[in-house]
Image (cartoon, grey):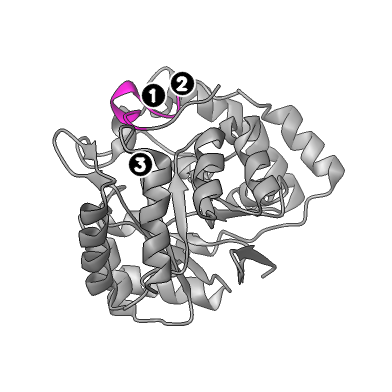
Amino acid sequence: MQQRFIGNRSVGAVGFGAMSFGGMFGATDEATSLACLDAAAAAGISHVDTANIYGMGVSERIIGMWGRRDVHLATKCGIVGGPPRTVRNDEPYIRQCLEESLRRLNREHVDLYYIHRRQPDIPIEDLAGTMAKLVQEGKIGGYGLSEIAPSTLRRAHAEHPVTAVQNEFSLWTRLPQLGLIQACQQLGVAFVAFSPLGRGVFGRTPLTRTFRAGIDFRDSNPRFVEPNFSANLAAIAPFRDLCAARGWTVPGAALAWVLAQGDHIIPIPGTRTADHLADWQVPVLDTADLSRIEHLLPAGFAHGSRYGDHQMAFVESYC
């Protein structure tokens, strides 16, 4: 696998997002999750991303059970489970969450520690100062921010260098191209793209409306409810046809498009099973391929917002 950088650490260009280990998209179990992690490592994936909120610690605990020390590991804090869901970025809370995460992960140090959502009434400079202390103490290798605006990145980076920014980015979610990806490149910050496969819409086969209410959050996500859901499947169908004609897997081609948008971009697709991970075979796209994909799936093609109003709390907007 080709390599890219998070800070000064070289990692596989495609990372692994472990949210689904916490049951966010349906039931799973420890054995299946551990086998999936083994398959990821065998495929050359060397960056694993989780968070304390994923299954309320379940995802972190599974990664701790796995016990690999040769992977670059990231976790997050800042979202406080509800209802209602809130955020906290104060130093005592961040330190408490970090110690709890380290225990679950079976580590004394985490390579990358994100603030999952920003608390608006705490100056970003104060937050960056807290994260700088953790770096200086050797608790974390670097810090990151998630779902932020370019202005927030620049302010934080001026206080203490940011290692990575993690925002949603895929063929059907292009907002980061309106300033954030460029800001990361200018500052030497890795851009980590979560949900690069559109929460399964760019999976092996077309999705069906079988999301479990109250468990799978896609059940109430605007892009996955009718009439948007059927419209989106129809819009993506020609892309699926192109992949079949070229001998690409649909997930592999979607990841290749993300990777082609900048050499500082690292997508972190997720899955519960090793079987689905086998579809992440990334082809080399030439200029003609990228042009054809852009024609089939132009920016803004998606029907519906990426989040509902109830999911937008503490997500920074900038356009």
* SS class, disc 1: helix
Rendered location of residue 55, percent (x, y) = 23, 54
Q: Is residue 229 left or right of residue 282?
A: left
* N-terminal-most mark, 1 or 3: 3
Residue at (56% x, 59% y) in the render: 279
- Examine the rendering and report whether any part of residue 150 can be seen: yes
- Examine the rendering and report whether any part of residue 168 can be seen: no
Rendered location of residue 127, percent (x, y) = 37, 48
Segment tinted magenta in the rendering: 304-314
To which residue does mark 3 refer? 117
* N-terminal-most mark, 2 or 3: 3
* SS class, disc 2: loop
Viewport quadrant of the N terminus? bottom right
To which residue does mark 1 refer? 222
Q: Amino acid at mark 2?
A: Gly
Q: With respect to residue 26, does 21 lie above or below?
A: below
Residue 312: within the magenta?
Answer: yes
Rendered location of residue 96, percent (x, y) = 20, 61
Rendered location of residue 76, percent (x, y) = 35, 55
Q: Is residue 163 left or right of residue 88?
A: right
Residue 245: within the magenta?
Answer: no
Q: With respect to residue 203, does 8 lie above or below?
A: below
Viewport quadrant of the C terminus? top right
Q: From mark 2 to mark 3, how far is it between C-alphas?
A: 23 Å
Residue at (69% x, 53% y) in the render: 248
Badge nearest the viewer, 2 or 3: 3
To which residue does mark 2 refer? 304
